[in-house]
Amino acid sequence: MTAFIARRVLRGLAVLFVLSIVAFGLVRLLPGNPADVLAGPYSDAATRARLAQDLGLNRPLTEQYLMWLGRLLHGDFGVSVYNGLPVLQLIKERLPNTLELALAATVVSILWGVPAGAIAALRQGRTFDRMARGAAFLGLATPVFVFGVCLVLVASIAVPSWPSVGFVPFSDHPVRNLQSTVLPALALGLPLGATLCRFMRTSMIEVYEQDYLRTALATGATRLQATLRHGLRNASGPVVTVAGLQLAGLVGNSILIENVFAIPGIGQLTVNSLMQKDYSVTQACILLLGLVYIVMNLVVDLIHLLIDPRVGGSR
């Protein structure tokens, strides 16, 4: 187990290193730079050149990257050129909002996706199965921001008093926090639940064709009893893998949803920093998204080991 975790951590660090190079290079391919934004559209070339020198943007890209990487290894994520605040402070202020949204969306996806997929497999070919497959197809085919816009419109018409946009921290008002989280959690959780529903249905159907489940049925157990005792655990492997990757993607999808619902989270911070050419903030946000994927992959592998210890030797 220790060697397995060590290998995965080393791979994750290598991925983060490559991602740091990609993030550093991509943001500099965008037109403009922080000096142009700070100087304003009506500034002269001398002013922009002086600001670029103060920010170190006139140095070779290799030198800029090594300086940024060195500060990063010492825990210094830099300072936002837009408001002068430390990047780490900006992330700490917004990360809890994104994590709360991701947790709520996860609950929504599991509550409808996993049971619907299992029941659809149990009633394969019947009305519920066709309805579940139709709902899953609709969820997969519809982008998350479309769900978000539709939910805002429906809530504004059906329940005008409901806070359809904006966000209230839990520490300020728990009830309003819950209200402001419901719609974005549905917008993120419904498409994710559609993916879980399809994979759960397919996995359960494969399990029903296995000999051990036929033996359980032959011993007198009902189909429901055999499913609960033997089917769910054996069918959960592929679902856990997909769920882990999809949950990591929730942080990425929050870029769209947080801007639709005006939630001050990591997604909104990423978009704003891109618009403002704030290199330090953008690079930190990209690395954070990559770190989330790496951690979720490690968690998924560990859960697989708990479900089936035999997979440890093949990974």
Image (tube, grey):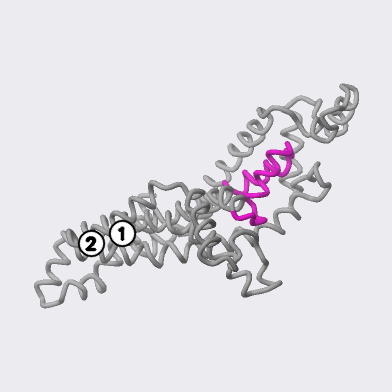
Label 2 secondary element: helix
Seen at 69% across and 30% down, the residue is: 28
User: Mark number for residue 121?
Assistant: 2
Q: Main secondary structure of the magenta part?
A: helix
- Residue 275 lies in the magenta stretch: yes
265 vs 70, left or right, is: left
Residue 36 percent coordinates (x, y): 80, 30
Query: Measured along the vertical axis of the image, is residue 270 above or below residue 224?
Result: above
Please identify the quarter of the rendering in which residue 72 is found.
top right
Crowding at mark 1 (Cα within 10 Å: few <14, some 14-19, many 20+)? many
Task: Identify the residue under disc 1.
Answer: 200
The alpha-carbon separation of the residues under discs 2 and 1 comes to 8 Å
**Could you tell me if the residues under marks 2 and 1 are in contact, i.e. CB atoms within 8 Å?**
yes
Residue 260 percent coordinates (x, y): 59, 51
74 vs 18, left or right, is: right
The furthest residue to the top? 45
Query: Measured along the vertical axis of the image, is residue 298 above or below residue 24?
Result: below
Please identify the quarter of the rendering in which residue 169 is found.
bottom right
The amino acid at mark 1 is Met
The furthest residue to the bottom? 220
Task: State the residue in front, 224 or 155.
Answer: 155
N-term mark: 2 or 1: 2
Q: Which residues are magenta?
A: 261-290
Residue 237 percent coordinates (x, y): 33, 58
Seen at 64% across and 74% down, the residue is: 174
